[in-house]
Image (cartoon, helix red, strand yellow):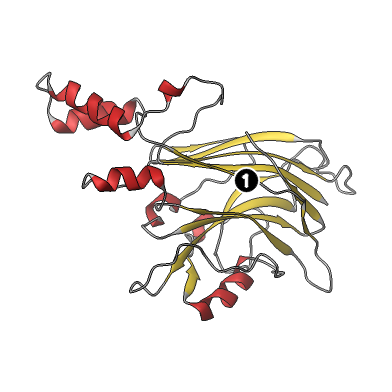
Amino acid sequence: MASFFSTIGRLLGLAQDEPSRPGWSIPSYEDVCQARASLKALNLPTELVLQILDYAHYWPQYEYVSNFRQPKVAAAQGGRPSHATLCADMDALNNTTVEEVLRYGETCKIKSVEFNIASLDQAWTSENTHGTFNTSSWLEVSILRKMDHTTTAATGPHLSHMRFSDPCDYHQTVSSQGWSLIKRPQSAKQGPQDGEGDFAWYLQGNRVAVGLDEYRIVWSVEGQEGNEGAGSGEGFLNELTEGDRILVWARAKVSCLFYDGIL
């Protein structure tokens, strides 16, 4: 049994470690344009200007916060070896932050995704894995894409009421509705993801039989940040394109709960 107590995805830039930082630490698109113009006024080459802004992580940002009023329960029952509960469904490149950038003819590319989560495993184990990340309860992330490019959809399929064994099970269901989960590189497999079709990136494992822990995982163009139980996010940012949705799954080989959480 495991509980997952908060999932937050922040797109288009590295999110702040402390939510109490003043507003000026999160630049708007206008702020970025002004900084770019100031650097250009110094007669710096455009390539160097962009490198400076990237080095400073001076990017617009979009924040998504999970908001569940009741726990979401995932339980491996009825002969199913595992269970997947959909915990978050967010639009990657169709939001107010991106819309502002696109109005000025810019091209958007996600530089970084940050997840802040708090999670815990069951309070006991019969194996010699206490305190390790050799776990059977974890979080993972999928990319959902509308395959019919002649139409657009404001939201993804409404299937939160259905039960799924794993993301591959979900993929087989939504494919008849014109949606598809994007496959990760096989080399990005981690933990207990064998034999599940490569439809999700491993995000964070629970420390076995330990209480609530908070985790920060960053997947960026510069690499990955996180602890030894975090996923690498290999290939994730390169796959994201306009219209994609990011799904966060709570996974367990045994019962798990997902609770509401805010930063």
In the depicted structure, whether residue 117 falls above or below residue 38: below
In the depicted structure, whether residue 79 falls above or below residue 216: below
In the depicted structure, whether residue 90 falls above or below residue 123: below
Q: Nearer the viewer, residue 218 or 262?
A: 262
Q: Is residue 254 left or right of residue 180?
A: right
Residue 61: tell me if it is visible: yes
Badge 1 density bin: few <14, some 14–19, many ≥20, Cα 10 Å: some
Residue 109: tell me if it is visible: no
Q: Nearer the viewer, residue 202 or 112?
A: 112
**How far across and how far down the image is residue 58, in percent?**
34, 28
**How far across and how far down the image is residue 196, in percent?**
62, 67
Q: Amino acid at mark 1?
A: Ser
Tell me which residue sits at (23%, 26%) in the image. 34
Looking at this rendering, what residue extends furthest in the bottom direction? 176
Q: Is residue 44 left or right of residue 94?
A: left
Q: Nearer the viewer, residue 30 or 137?
A: 30
* Residue where numbered disc 1 is placed: 66
Tell me which residue sits at (41%, 21%) in the image. 24
Which quarter of the figure is the C terminus placed in?
top right
Q: Quadrant of residue 28?
A: top left
Q: How many marks?
A: 1
Q: Is residue 249 left or right of residue 239?
A: right
**How far across and how far down the image is residue 248, in percent?**
60, 53
In the depicted structure, whether residue 90 falls above or below residue 23: below
Tell me which residue sits at (52%, 45%) in the image. 232
Tell me which residue sits at (72%, 69%) in the image. 163
**How far across and how far down the image is residue 201, in percent?**
55, 55
**Local secondary structure at mark 1:** loop
Q: Is residue 202 left or right of residue 150?
A: right
Looking at this rendering, what residue extends furthest in the left direction? 43
